[in-house]
């Protein structure tokens, strides 16, 4: 599939991912040690420095541009400890950034010091711990390449390769292999975190999966609570908890030798409400039937992109993009059967582009969009579905999406479930373990376009989809709450959340009280906070 074809089928929509991290600031001397072998220490970049402007715009969502007193670009855990300690002693508000992909203004809002992790980007096997170490500034594509070419293994992480590990893993992490292998955090072995104690002293703590570890609660909190809550992650260690021994080639899942990738497409022209309802219902019912662990379709991952109708000469259309392990028996036949099941009874007829077979890493790299294709101003709202959209919800989606607009507006339903659903909700901080689909409402715009109209559109779509539960996806029925890696401050706003259910329940379910206890122990001064961070428990 050509890049031009892919962009057209995606409807010009900003795809969830972000700006590149490693190598973005090649002029920074802190990116490596000096010729003498001495570490120059963290680079402090203030407003008079010409590098400051580059650091301000380093991020995917251009709605938000942090303006701290200074950035600290760090290259080691020791540097993070010093940078945090200096800021705390000076009474300055600290935030942290790894890949620059936060969907809300958590990095910039009120920050006086931003600790930037982009140059901490190593991926390697740590023989002492018997696990793979991933630093927070490493992009997912960095990790995939190093793990695959070095040891023939991978992580079930996101498909947007420019996302960095720092925020992705701590929020749970999922992607195309999650239906078969589970979430990224299901492989979290240990985590190194710079925390601040009640006296204001910064230090690094390693917390592990081992329940006997006195720091075990800090490990648990980093299995789905999201970033910016307890401290600054400086390293993750990952391995399969079910595997014995220390052979690195066996300690993480092996990716498929090859992938099939396919795209089906329906134009808006001739798409009635009844036909749209049938298409979305078919897609949801297929996932209800085919999301149990170990099913023949466990390796199939698809994204139904209900792209809003355009008022341009080409009105655009609806896209179903999917990939599947090419080594599964009759893989292409199964993929075509999936397309046919979604298209049954739908008019106009779908168009299926030629199905391609590619080596795994090449396919993953090809599917990921570039920084330029992903960077814009945008608003994202998320939800989990335990069952398909109701017919009422589908009709709401049609009403919002079929009104022609000049800017990208879309609703995605993303394959989920499978192995993800085998883990008890309390075993990790990722509480939602019953859903079969993830849903994203998204609008985007560029400088000079009507961002207010785009914001209003996506807010109203999300509110109307969940009108029967107060405008938000309250867990229960066909809903499973929302995903903290796609944070949405509207969920904490009574104007948009009229359910009476707090946003903390939407994101953390029954795990929130435990997260508060972890917060009280490891961040008693509330140093690490933002608009949707874990709150300290009331005295």
Image (cartoon, rainbow, N blue to C red):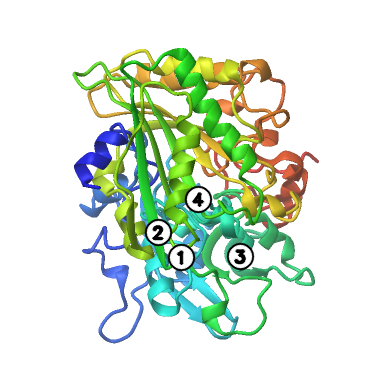
Few, some or many residues within 10 Å of mark 4 (<14, 14–19, 20+): many
Q: Are marks 1 and 2 in contact (CB under 8 Å)?
A: yes
Residue located at (36% from left, 58% from top)? 364
Q: Whole-Å distance between the Cαs marked 4 and 1? A: 11 Å
Q: Whole-Å distance between the Cαs marked 1 and 3? A: 18 Å
**Residue 309 place in picture, x, y as percent:** 33, 19
Asked if 512 appears above or below 295 in the picture, the reply is above
State whether residue 139 appears in this view: no
Q: Which mark is residue 187?
A: 3
Tell me the mark number nearer the camera, choosing from 1 and 3. Answer: 1
Earlier sequence position, callout 4 versus callout 1: 1
Q: Do the residues labelled 4 and 3 touch (CB within 8 Å)?
A: no
Earlier sequence position, callout 4 versus callout 2: 2
- For the residue pair 310 and 225, the one nearer the viewer reads as 310
**Residue 3 place in picture, x, y as percent:** 22, 46
Q: Whole-Å distance between the Cαs marked 4 and 2? A: 10 Å
Task: Tell me the SS state at disc 3.
Answer: helix
Q: Name the residue under label 4.
A: 300
Tell me the mark number nearer the camera, choosing from 4 and 3. Answer: 4
Q: Whole-Å distance between the Cαs marked 1 and 2? A: 7 Å
**Residue 426 place in picture, x, y as percent:** 76, 51
Examine the image and state in which quarter residue 303 appears: top left
Q: Mark 1 points at which residue?
A: 256
Q: Name the residue under label 2.
A: 259
Asked if 225 appears above or below 456 in the picture, the reply is below
Task: Tell me the SS state at disc 1.
Answer: loop
């Amino acid at each position: 599939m050509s890049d031009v074809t892919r962009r057209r089928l995606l409807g010009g929509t900003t795809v969830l991912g972000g700006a590149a991290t490693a190598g973005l600031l090649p002029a920074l001397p802190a990116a490596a040690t000096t010729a003498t072998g001495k570490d120059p220490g963290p680079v402090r970049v203030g407003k008079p420095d010409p590098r400051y402007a580059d650091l301000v715009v380093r991020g995917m969502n251009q709605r938000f541009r942090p303006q701290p007193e200074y950035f600290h670009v760090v290259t080691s855990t020791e540097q993070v400890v010093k940078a945090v300690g200096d800021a705390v002693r000076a009474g300055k508000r600290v935030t942290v950034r790894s890949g620059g992909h936060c969907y809300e203004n958590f990095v910039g809002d009120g920050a006086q010091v931003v600790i930037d992790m982009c140059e901490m980007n190593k991926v390697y096997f740590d023989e002492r711990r018997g696990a793979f170490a991933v630093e927070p500034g490493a992009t997912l594509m960095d990790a995939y390449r190093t793990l695959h070419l070095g040891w023939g293994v991978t992580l079930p992480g996101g498909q947007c390769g420019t996302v960095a590990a720092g925020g992705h893993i701590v929020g749970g992490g999922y992607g195309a292999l999650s239906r078969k292998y589970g979430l990224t955090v299901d492989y979290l072995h240990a985590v190194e975190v710079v925390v601040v104690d009640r006296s204001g002293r910064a230090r690094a703590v390693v917390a592990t999966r081992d329940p006997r570890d006195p720091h075990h609660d800090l490990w648990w909190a980093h299995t789905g609570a999201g970033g910016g809550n307890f401290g600054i992650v400086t390293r993750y260690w990952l391995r399969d908890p079910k595997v014995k021994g220390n052979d690195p080639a066996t300690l993480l899942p092996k990716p498929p030798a090859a992938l099939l990738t396919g795209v089906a497409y329906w134009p808006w022209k001739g798409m009635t409400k009844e036909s749209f309802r049938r298409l979305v219902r078919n897609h949801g019912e297929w996932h209800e039937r085919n999301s149990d662990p170990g099913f023949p379709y466990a390796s199939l991952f698809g994204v139904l992109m209900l792209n809003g109708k355009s008022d341009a000469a080409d009105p655009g259309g609806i896209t179903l993009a999917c990939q599947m392990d090419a080594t599964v028996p009759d893989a292409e036949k199964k993929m075509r059967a999936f397309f046919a099941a979604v298209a049954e009874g739908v008019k106009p007829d779908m168009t299926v582009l030629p199905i391609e077979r590619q080596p795994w890493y090449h396919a993953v790299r090809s599917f990921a969009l570039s920084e330029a294709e992903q960077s814009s101003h945008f608003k994202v709202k998320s939800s989990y579905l335990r069952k398909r959209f109701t017919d009422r919800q589908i009709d709401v989606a049609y009403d919002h999406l079929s009104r022609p607009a000049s800017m990208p507006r879309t609703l995605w339903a993303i394959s989920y479930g499978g192995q993800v659903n085998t883990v008890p909700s309390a075993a990790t901080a990722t509480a939602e373990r019953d859903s079969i689909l993830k849903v994203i409402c998204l609008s985007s715009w560029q400088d000079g376009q009507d961002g207010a109209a785009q914001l209003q559109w996506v807010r109203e779509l999300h509110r109307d989809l969940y009108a029967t539960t107060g405008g938000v996806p309250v867990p229960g029925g066909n809903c499973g709450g929302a995903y903290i890696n796609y944070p949405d401050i509207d969920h904490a706003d009574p104007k948009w959340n009229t359910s009476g259910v707090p946003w903390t329940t939407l994101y953390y379910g029954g795990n929130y009280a435990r997260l508060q206890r972890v917060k009280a122990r490891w961040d008693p001064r509330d140093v690490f906070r933002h608009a949707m961070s874990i709150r300290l428990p009331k005295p």
